[in-house]
Image (spheres, helix red, strand yellow):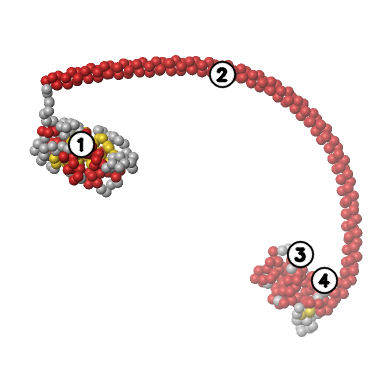
Amino acid sequence: MSGTPAADGGDPVDWSRLPDAVRGRLADVAAAAVGGLPATEVPVPLRRLARFTPAKRAKLGGPALLAELASSTVFRTAVVAWWDEHRPGELAPASDDALTAAAAAVLVGDAAAADAVAAAARRGDVGELRAERDAALSRVDKLTTELERLRGELGEAREQARSAGEQRDAEYQQLRRRVSEQGAKLRAAIDGREAADRVVEEVRAAAAADLATARADADRERARAEQERRRADRAAAEVAAARQAAREARQADEVRLGLLVDTLGGAVAGLRRELALGGGGPRPGDLVTGAGTAAGGGAVDGLAALDALLAVPTVHLVVDGYNVSKTGYPELTLADQRTRLVGQLAALAARTGVEVTVVFDGAGVVAAPVRGSRGVRVLFSDKGVIADDVIRSLVAAEPQGRPVLVATSDGAVVRSVQRSGAYTVPSTAILTRLVRG
């Protein structure tokens, strides 16, 4: 650490060799000044110490304070100026206190600073011995005082222990009384609980009796309801039997009426035979003319001729199913073709009253109902049999004289059924009639 030059050119002071006592006094002086100096005059490393008390500043920041005093003339000047302003006369080289005089001489750079430091060191040695003696005597006095204090505290502790024992005995007696009182309350509570248990048992017994009575009443009501249900079932059975008897009586009446009608029909047939009515004359279908038909059957090409033939009573319309449906709606699946064609034929049968039979190929591979809806007969050819043969069989099975109309564009079927006396109409013509309605 560098030395501080003397004001008149004397030997500089070596801060690193200053006695500890002088160093401590310098730290105390700087610590007192740092707390009162403006922040701008306090070196940056020391500004955090300004928040501490002077004693704490000197103890914790002593090395930093001494380093700033040794290196900064401006800081030393500010510290001296603060002492001159706030504590005039206390920090002077001529002070009676050797440590204060040495610290002041070092700070102001007095020429006799080295001598003042040496005098402070010598006085400090004597003072240290004296201080050690005074400190020892002080410690003896303190120990004596502490001993007396401890004796007093021991007496007080004994007195407190005796008082505490008496208080503990009193509390023990009080606790015994409380335990006795709580025991009495507990016995009373137990007695009350036993009484309550008895009341609960009585209530349970009464409730069980009421429940048994209610169950018996419910059983009686259930038995009564079961009897009423049985009576109702017998009444319902009797009503059903009466209705069955009425239906059977009505059916018997209908059978008798049917027998009567059959008897009348037989009588009428016998009368027709006796009178030779309707002998071998032509049937109504044989009388249809003007439709471009030939004797014994023929082709129906126009819609007018088709309508005239459909208006004949007892006419039978036989439809070549797939021949017509594939002509009319080939874009549909076979199942949808069948459904659509049967629906249109049912509407035609409902409007005209004609008997309609539609024949499809493939009963062995197509699961479909034998009879269509709303008066349309739906037939599927057996395995190994084509629909054309079924159509020929239908035409052949009709009695002679009944008009039969076959809807197909198959040339072979047309020629064969015409030879059997049936009429034919192309698939396009029947489709036009079905669409027109």
Among the two numbered marks 3 and 1 on one chain, the one whose residue lies closer to the N terminus:
3
Among the two numbered marks 1 and 2 on one chain, the one whose residue lies closer to the N terminus:
2
Q: Is residue 369 visible?
A: yes
Mark 4 against mark 1, which lies toward the viewer?
1
Residue indicated by mark 3: 55
In the image, residue 370 sits, relative to residue 245, either above or below, namely below
Q: Residues within 10 Å of mark 1 (few under 14, many from 20)?
A: many
Mark 1 against mark 2, which lies toward the viewer?
1
Among the two numbered marks 3 and 2 on one chain, the one whose residue lies closer to the N terminus:
3
Q: CA–CA distance between discs 3 and 4?
A: 15 Å
> Mark 3 near mark 4, Cβ–Cβ under 8 Å?
no
What is the x, y in percent for residue 80? 73, 73
Q: CA–CA distance between discs 1 and 2?
A: 80 Å
- Of 187 and 41, the residue lying toward us: 187
Q: Is residue 338 visible?
A: no
Tell me where residue 411 sits by quadrant.
top left
Mark 3 against mark 2, which lies toward the viewer?
2
